[in-house]
Image: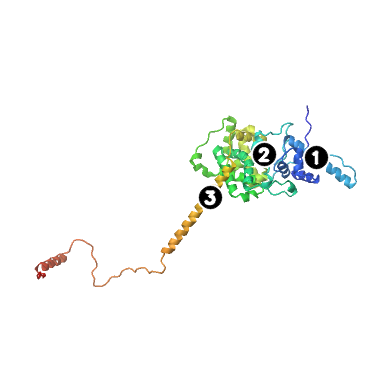
Amino acid sequence: MTRSPSIPLPPPKERRRLREAASLTRTQVAARLGVPRETVRSWETGRTKPRGRKREASAKLLNSLATEAVVTSGQVAGAGSAPTAPLPAPTPAATAAGGVRTEEPPPAAAGADPGPDDPAKLLSEPLSEPVPDFLAHPDPDAASDAAPALTPAQAFDALYAFCAPSLVRQTYLLTGRRELARESVERAFQIAWERWPEVARDRDPAGWVRAAAYEYALSPWHCFRPRYRYPEPPPADPSARALLDVLLTLPPPHRRTLLLYDGVGLGLPETAAETEATTPAAANRLLHAREAVAARLPELSDPDVLHHRLAELACAERLRAAKPPRVRWTSERRARFWTRAAIAFTVALIGTTALTLRTAPTKYEPPVPPGSTVRGVPPRIAPGPLSEAERELRGKLRQQLTSGPERLAPLPG
């Protein structure tokens, strides 16, 4: 049985234009496709791409909207109905660095839509999807669909539940240590709770937390900690163990770039921005990382196969993060500790300064000048043997004391 050719997808900006031309909101499009509203927004911004049956349904809907727009414009112009034609396929464009293409992935087979237990979805989809609307910038065209106002704790818990499970698995691929992966994610969310107003207003709160977790996980100071001085037990599967060994041999910048592009599914400009590198430098790191992996494991030379293998490796381990209330409580306790330490240090500094001012002299006291020699006074001689003249003088004095006049003493009356 032959399969009918799939309908091409327009570029992300064209998708939004077609939806706005048909006077449809993202909520209405999401209801037609059976997906969350945030997913439609992610497709229109280009952060994620529909796959499988969702891709086919989205392509059919956009094609019908384009057909209606062409017919409507023809009727308004008085030229009759325009012929129906499928949307042109987007042209794949290679990046300036060369070798890394940002084209639409090939359509999946019928029934190949990733389910809730698909490893690739568990690794990349939660962080590829945008965060809920109350954590992102307000959307002007969706004011009626705005979510109800939440407290800061509720918004933080929503972001944590949205990002933490997949972020722990990604951090495990970076470090190869289960405990360090959990600690890095918890520490990143603790910092996010300390700076919550800044994080909540960020355009990509999930990316903010992800960058903080990656920075903490890749810190070189962990090698001096006794608990992380020795490697952890490797995975039981030989293929997973081989892939993890190859990843850990890569330099940290190359490993991070490979995980963001082939694991999480970010675009090359987003990957370069998150790794604080230029787009050509990020492309070179990605190519070198792929070459190193393909040299050790030739079966992973295909990026799609590498993506699924990374997802399977991450999902093979039982990695659970702490509960959101505990993360917030730990963050608040740490903030209180450092606040009290800063106050104590400030009080000690003020007390030391006050004591110094209290005991310091208030007027100038000139130093004592060095002694000068006085004429006619013999210098002091250190103790030692007596000279001949000194012996004669001592004998003479003793004789005079013994032969002198008698001492007068009063008599009792």
Q: Residues within 10 Å of mark 2 (few under 14, many from 20)?
A: some
Mark 1 and mark 3: Cα distance apart in space: 57 Å
Name the quadrant of the N terminus. top right
Mark 1 and mark 2: Cα distance apart in space: 25 Å
Mark 2 and mark 3: Cα distance apart in space: 36 Å
If you read the primary sequence from the N terminus, does the residue marked by circle 1 or circle 2 appear first? 1
Which residue corresponds to mark 1? Answer: 63
Quarter-wise, where is residue 172 in the image?
top right
Helix, strand or loop at disc 3?
A: helix
Helix, strand or loop at disc 1?
A: helix
Q: Is residue 208 visible?
A: yes
Q: Nearer the viewer, residue 45 or 410?
A: 410
Name the quadrant of the C terminus. bottom left
Q: Position of residue 359 (x, y in %)?
A: 41, 63
Q: Which mark is residue 336?
A: 3
Q: Which mark's residue is nearer the viewer, 2 or 3?
A: 3
Q: Nearer the viewer, residue 220 or 120?
A: 120
Which residue corresponds to mark 2? Answer: 125
Quarter-wise, where is residue 52 in the image?
top right
Q: Position of residue 244 (x, y in %)?
A: 58, 35
Q: Is residue 281 left or right of residue 66?
A: left
Amino acid type at image mark 1: Asn
If you read the primary sequence from the N terminus, does the residue marked by circle 1 or circle 3 appear first? 1
Q: Which mark's residue is nearer the viewer, 1 or 3?
A: 3
Helix, strand or loop at disc 2?
A: helix
Q: Residues within 10 Å of mark 1 (few under 14, many from 20)?
A: many
Q: Nearer the viewer, residue 278 or 205?
A: 205
Looking at the image, the residue that sits furthest to the bottom is 375
Amino acid type at image mark 2: Glu
